[in-house]
């Protein structure tokens, strides 16, 4: 009897202790869904940070550009035949460009310098030469056509410095040449294609690259170059002039013409 009572007391004490023990919460379906959404958000944020980091393939665009373009310009004015053996004017151009990414990623602002010089013989009695310097600014807009190629539209304005020189041959070759100059303003429109070659293996076209381009267009010069005041160039001002020097009207010249050029650029 005593053994039965003792066993009952032990069972009751065990049940009481079991009721006082803290219960561990079981995971609910809502908490599982919330944890899954948090993990997905963290994963998306990490992927986005990796894609926009400087080490990504398409990051690190190159805003500065150095370029060299070699081109030919056709001048259709027949009076140009008195200054050159052909209607073409070879015109190399060097310059620098800057791409303001805050304005437009496809836009490049350029500032360049070009020079051309030709000469010919007039009836074997006189040598004529013509020189054209140009300082020009332009805005180029690139339209991608595939990963490494773009079609570029370029519009610009030029400040032109034209000069002509006439030098006598034969018995009068010791005389100073006749020379004249004029300053003009030109407008230029060009359409071309550029192939961009990344400088790094696996690099993006927007990063450091070498560009090869071909383009064609037209430059219009609203006013003609005026050489109505061509004078003899006397280099020694102390030398007396026996005959007063008078100006010579060498005429006017239309410098408008078509442009075809090829170039290379380094963007970094």
Image (cartoon, helix red, strand yellow):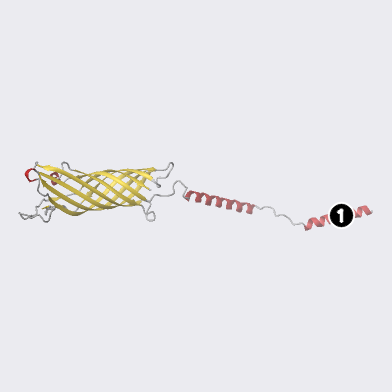
Count residues near mark 1 (Cα–Cα under 10 Å), then give few for <14, some for 14-19, many for 20+: few
Q: Could you say where residue 47 lies in the image, as x and y percent from the top left?
A: 52, 49
Left or right: where 32 falls relative to 237: right
Side (left or right) of 170 relative to 118: left
Horizontal side, residue 100 vs residue 223: left or right: right
Of residues 135 and 213, the one drawn nearer to the viewer in this rendering:
135
Label 1, on which residue? 10
Q: Which residue is drawn at 6% across and 44% down?
A: 171
Please say whether residue 132 is visible from this viewpoint. Answer: yes
Q: Position of residue 22 (x, y in %)?
A: 74, 57
Residue at 63% x, 51% y: name it: 32
Q: Which of 119 and 81 is in front in this view?
A: 119
Residue 13 location in percent, x, y?
Answer: 84, 56
* Residue 77 makes an appearance in the image: no
> For numbered disc 1, what is the local secondary structure?
helix
| Outermost residue, right side | 1
Q: Looking at the image, which is closer to me, 8 or 182?
A: 182
Above/below status of 123 relative to 19: above
């Amino acid at each position: 009897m005593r053994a039965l009572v003792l066993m009952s007391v032990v069972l009751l004490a065990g049940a009481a202790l079991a009721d006082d023990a803290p219960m561990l919460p079981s995971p609910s379906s809502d908490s599982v869904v919330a944890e899954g959404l948090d993990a997905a958000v963290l994963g998306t944020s990490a992927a986005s940070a990796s894609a926009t980091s400087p080490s990504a393939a398409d990051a690190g665009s190159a805003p500065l550009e150095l370029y060299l373009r070699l081109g030919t310009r056709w001048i259709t004015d027949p009076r140009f035949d008195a200054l050159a053996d052909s209607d073409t004017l070879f015109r190399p151009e060097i310059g620098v460009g800057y791409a303001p990414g805050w304005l437009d990623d496809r836009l490049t602002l350029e500032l360049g310098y070009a020079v051309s010089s030709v000469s010919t013989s007039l009836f074997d009695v006189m040598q004529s030469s013509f020189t054209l310097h140009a300082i020009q600014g332009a805005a180029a807009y690139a339209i991608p056509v595939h990963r490494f190629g773009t079609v570029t539209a370029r519009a610009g304005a030029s400040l032109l410095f034209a000069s002509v020189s006439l030098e006598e041959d034969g018995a009068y070759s010791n005389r100073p040449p006749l020379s004249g100059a004029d300053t003009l303003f030109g407008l230029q429109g060009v359409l071309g294609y550029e192939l961009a070659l990344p400088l790094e293996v696996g690099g993006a076209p927007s990063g450091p690259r070498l560009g090869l381009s071909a383009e064609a267009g037209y430059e219009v010069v609203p006013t003609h170059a005026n050489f109505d005041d061509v004078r003899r160039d006397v280099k020694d001002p102390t030398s007396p002039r026996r005959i007063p020097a008078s100006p010579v009207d060498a005429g006017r010249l239309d410098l408008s013409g078509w442009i075809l050029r090829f170039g290379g650029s380094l963007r970094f």
